[in-house]
Amino acid sequence: MTTLLVMKQIIITLYSKYEVYITPFLKFVLALISLLCINARIGYMESIDRLTLVLIVALMCSFMPMNFIVVVSALFAVLHLYSFSLECAAVVGAGFLLMFLLYLRFSPGDTVVVVLLPVCFLLRIPYVIPLAMGLVGTLASAVSVVCGVIVYYMLHYVAQNASAIAAMADEETGAKFRFIIDGILRNREMAVVIAAFATTVIVVYLLRRLSIDYAWTIAMAAGVIVNIMVLLVGDLMFDINVGLFGVIFGNVIAFLLALVLQFFVFHVDYSRTEKVQFEDDEYYYYVKAVPKFSVSRPEKKVKQINSQKSKPVQRTRSTH
């Protein structure tokens, strides 16, 4: 444990020292992965499906606010869909606009979730996001998680039904709009995942704020159980073909990743908990103090060995 705490302290120190370089680099990586995933999933416009352009845009995102990555990713998605179908671009663009208005109203500080959650879906680890946002976010973070789920399933629906939409080229525009909108709004799997993720964020947030020992660990365990239960109940009710093994395994991985997050954000020593009571003229105060695990970095001691032997000191006798 001491070794892990020392490593944690080293990482925190390095990040604090080189934050001006690390933060833009992380933004660059996030923007690069997001744009590459969009191009791989719905890369219909060849002019923006180029690695050179993606690198330039990702580099530009590294020096801009996090909201800029969301806007650029949405713009890339809409442009690809415009090249494929004007109706798809209009529906998805309207969905992005509504989400931005709702998102900026309730949880403007959780921008990264809207971009990160669709990427986690593609990496098969989406369950870690509601757990993490319940631990470090607020109740409004459920809105950001819901927006991220909607973004993924909108793009997933278009990519999955591209051949059917392309076959409707000769039909009326109204029929195309109806087919796309009905397909997105009546997606039962998306509705179940929204319910599961939003409930998980709320449960984890409420439990981790309780004044009990191991609140974060209890909140993570409860969030995993709630997530699995809601997904399985939704599968039984709507027959969305959710794989039992995939859900359980994915939530176990999410729990382990949440433990890593807890280690860096909220690692405390409950064995040294202190409870203090005091008062002033107006209130009584009951305070529970839980100290954090901390360890100082070992200092390196350099021992200098002289090659030359020290000469004996000659003493002189004074005469009076």
Image (cartoon, rainbow, N blue to C red):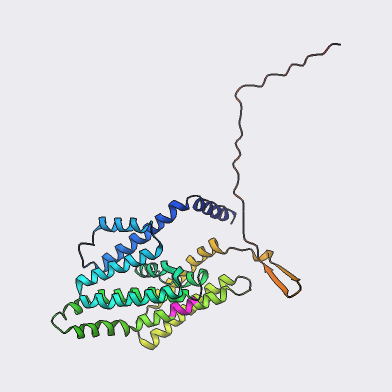
Residue 206 visible, this angle:
yes
Residue 50's quadrant in the figure?
Answer: bottom left
Residue that lies at the very extreme toward the left in this rendered image? 170
Whether residue 19 sits left or right of residue 319 in the image: it is left
The x, y position of residue 119, in whole percent, is: 36, 67
Q: Residue at 28% x, 69% y: name it.
A: 77
Q: Residue at 24% x, 76% y: name it.
A: 88
Q: Is residue 27 above or below residue 109?
A: above
Number of marks:
0
Residue 100's quadrant in the figure?
Answer: bottom left
The x, y position of residue 54, in whole percent, is: 28, 58
| Quadrant occupied by the C terminus | top right
Q: Residue at 26% x, 55% y: name it.
A: 52
Residue that lies at the very extreme toward the top in this rendered image? 319
Which stretch is magenta? 196-201
For this rendering, which residue is in front, 112 or 233? Answer: 112
The x, y position of residue 231, in whole percent, is: 42, 81
For this rendering, which residue is in front, 186 or 246? Answer: 186
The x, y position of residue 190, in whole percent, is: 36, 80
Whether residue 285 sits left or right of residue 153 in the image: it is right
Whether residue 54 sits left or right of residue 24 in the image: it is left
Instruction: Examine the residues drawn in magenta and state their main secondary structure.
Output: helix
Residue 245 visible, this angle:
no
Magenta stretch: residue 124 in it?
no
Magenta stretch: residue 200 in it?
yes
Q: Residue at 23% x, 83% y: name it.
A: 177
| Quadrant occupied by the N terminus | bottom right
